[in-house]
Image (cartoon, grey):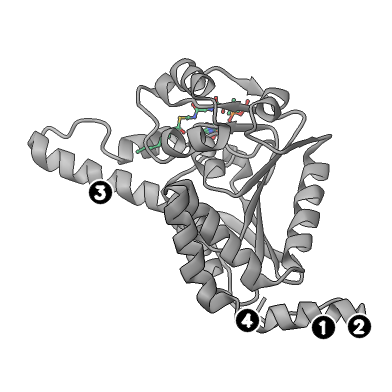
């Protein structure tokens, strides 16, 4: 790990070549998302986005569960409680900025051009759903339960769930049911509705599966993988025609990578191609 990844609330290591493991590390507080954790996540993923030694990332939680969501004290910090010294407009402006800052954390993960795999166990509540909705791939352990918890604390989810989850699940009726009721749903239901791609036996097996998948991705052409993420993100929010135009313009440059030449050569030599750092 050439660059330094030192954070108060995250443990970051590099378990194999070009693969990073980011672990939410507030186990005593069930990895509740406080202001420091948000700052750390944003810095970490901004750094990983441009780190030439990173090609794929796994995110997991230390201890009993993935995350219990945003801390109540942080909700108060976000000025959800009225400040009598400010008028509604000034209060609104501060709240707007705070919400945008919070959104930016998960948007940084979505925009990080390296694939992010969430390995979820135990529980994934409230802001946890916002977080995993900004990841590329989600796996979980059998014991996991999920909840779009925000209505239970008196707010509409405002940092990504309501925008991203419908595009992941594709069944708007279920999205609305989960958002309006805040009910817990199981790992099996998460698989049935398409929130996770696989359910694994336990905490350890889900993490190992995620790391194995990350290694497989990291062995591919990093140009091809990065370009695929950029194009999938763009196409999700645009028409088919716009998406096709975008990838045509993108690949005008990326088709000239040395990676393609190495792959064609490897067809003849039968040796695994080794790709340069990004
Ligand atoms: C602009 C704002 C946008 C953001 C909105 C986001 C909203 C949300 O995330 S809504 C969801 C909020 N979270 C919750 O409602 C969950 C609250 N926690 C629990 O229900 C339980 O802790 C849980 C079922 C998750 C786990 O239970 P368990 O018995 O395993 O642990 P506990 O003894 O309850 O907790 C252990 C210590 O962790 C602290 N903690 C747990 N969750 C939170 C949290 N969300 N915020 C702050 N602290 C949390 C808990 O207080 C215990 O601490 P201590 O007493 O010091 O040991």
Where is mark 3, residue-wise?
Answer: 97
Task: Give the SS element for disc 3.
Answer: helix
Q: Earlier in the sequence, mark 2 or mark 4?
A: 4
Q: Label 3, label 1: how many angstroms apart (C-alpha)? A: 52 Å
Nearer the viewer's eye, disc 4 or disc 3? 4
Q: Residues within 10 Å of mark 1 (few under 14, many from 20)?
A: some
Q: CA separation, marks 4 and 3? A: 40 Å
Circle 1: element type = helix
SS at badge 2: helix
According to the picture, the residue beneath numbered tag 2 turns out to be: 269
Query: In the rendering, at what x and y percent does residue 60 appear?
Result: 66, 48
The residue wearing badge 4 is 257
Mark toward the viewer: 3 or 1 = 1
Q: Secondary structure at mark 4?
A: loop
The mark nearer the N terminus, 3 or 1, is 3
Residue highlighted by disc 1: 265
């Amino acid at each position: 790990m050439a660059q330094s990844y030192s954070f108060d609330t995250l443990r970051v290591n590099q378990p194999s070549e070009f693969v990073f493991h980011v672990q939410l590390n507030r186990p005593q507080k069930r990895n509740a998302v406080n202001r420091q954790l948000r700052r750390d996540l944003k810095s970490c993923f901004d750094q990983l986005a441009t780190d030439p030694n990173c090609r794929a990332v796994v995110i997991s939680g230390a201890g009993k569960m993935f995350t219990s969501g945003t801390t109540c004290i942080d909700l108060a910090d976000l000025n959800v409680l009225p400040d009598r010294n400010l008028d509604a407009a000034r209060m609104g402006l501060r709240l707007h900025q705070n919400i945008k800052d919070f959104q930016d954390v998960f948007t940084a993960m979505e925009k990080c051009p390296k694939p992010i795999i969430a390995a979820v166990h135990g529980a994934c509540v409230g802001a946890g759903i916002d977080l995993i909705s900004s990841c590329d791939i989600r796996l979980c352990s059998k014991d996991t339960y999920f909840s779009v918890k925000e209505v239970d604390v008196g707010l509409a989810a405002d940092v990504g769930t309501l925008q991203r989850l419908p595009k992941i699940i594709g069944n708007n009726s279920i999205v609305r049911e989960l958002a309006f009721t805040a009910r817990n749903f199981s790992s099996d239901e998460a698989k049935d509705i398409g929130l996770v791609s696989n359910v694994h036996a336990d905490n350890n097996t889900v993490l190992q599966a995620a790391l194995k998948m990350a290694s497989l991705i990291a062995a591919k052409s990093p140009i091809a993988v990065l370009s695929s993420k950029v194009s999938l993100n763009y196409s999700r929010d645009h028409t088919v025609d716009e998406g096709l135009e975008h990838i045509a313009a993108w690949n005008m440059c990326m088709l000239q990578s040395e990676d393609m030449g190495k792959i064609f050569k490897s067809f003849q030599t039968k040796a695994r191609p080794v790709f340069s750092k990004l």
